Image (cartoon, helix red, strand yellow):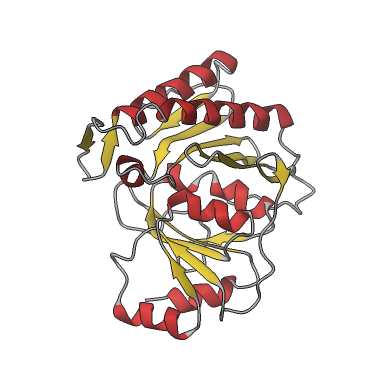
Amino acid sequence: MATDPDDVTTPPVDPVLLEQAVEWAQAAGELTLRWYNHPELDVHHKHDGSPVTEADRAAEQLLRDLITAAHPDDTVRGEEHDDVVGGSGRTWVIDPIDGTRAFSRGVGTYSNLLFLADEHGPAVGVVNLPALGETVAAGRGLGCFSGGVRCSVSDTDDLAGAHLSCTSLDEWSGERFARVVDAGVHLRTWGDAYGYALVASGRIDGMCDPALAWWDIAPLLVILPEAGGRITSWVGGDPATPSIDHPEYEFSAIASNGALHDRLVELLAD
């Protein structure tokens, strides 16, 4: 389940954990810049066809090392390496580069994602955008921050003139595209986690993805609610519940400022 910032029965996360997560994600981001826009970057493809680079593997290993050094009993999961199971009851989830396609083509919207869950549920979420010098991060009960300053979603309440981003239009039908355009929504792409960071910081009003992996969506379960927004599956359900019949990409997401959410879910329906 996503965090509920108004739920007084769930204690806030320790602010130190949020500070550590931001520091570590930024360190991983700094490491990836060694390969960013490099003319000799090698891009390989995994069994599912998605791209991976040496930067992905190096950034994840750095994050694993930092987490394990500070919290040796915590479980660590990541996209590129095997799980390490601990007994503390806390789990870190790493996406070393979200938006590897963007990264490999020199597009600066890629990010490093880090998530922490504890015995109470989602606790910390970080979207670090190293090429842009931005970090959007949130801790349960602590709020959402962009560049260390408290941020929140927009107050847009009309679809006409609202800005919606989506990572890809590959699976969109002509009918869906026409509905969005006819509603007066301004549609943008090159999304990935960058789009969700834009929603959380009030710069756009909605973001959507029809298929995501767990490490893609996990940090957003903290960031959007703490920014005052809303995130659900594509059909309006619990975003933390698998909704797609795919071995890796089992999740879907629509994120918004909340005021537009139900209308966006209806507008994007098949």
Residue 259 vs residue 118, the one in the foreground: 259
Vertical placement of residue 73 versus 52, above or below: above
| Residue at 57% over, 49% down | 221
Residue at the extreme right: 8
Q: Position of residue 204 (x, y in %)?
A: 57, 63
Using the rendered image of the protein, determine whether residue 151 is visible from the camera's viewpoint: yes
Q: Position of residue 225 (x, y in %)?
A: 65, 54
Residue at the extreme bottom: 182
Q: Residue 146 occupies which quadrant of the picture?
A: top right
Residue 123 vs residue 256, the one in the foreground: 256
Q: Position of residue 4 (x, y in %)?
A: 69, 53
95 sits to left or right of 9? left
Vertical placement of residue 105 versus 56, above or below: below
Q: Residue 171 occupies which quadrant of the picture?
A: bottom left
Residue 167 vs residue 90, the one in the foreground: 167
Residue 125 vs residue 187, the one in the foreground: 187
143 sits to left or right of 81? right
Q: Position of residue 44 (x, y in %)?
A: 21, 35
| Residue at 61% over, 48% down | 223
246 sits to left or right of 49? right
Total numbered circles: 0
Vertical placement of residue 178 versus 40, above or below: below
Location of the C terminus by quadrant is bottom left
Using the rendered image of the protein, determine whether residue 81 is visible from the camera's viewpoint: no
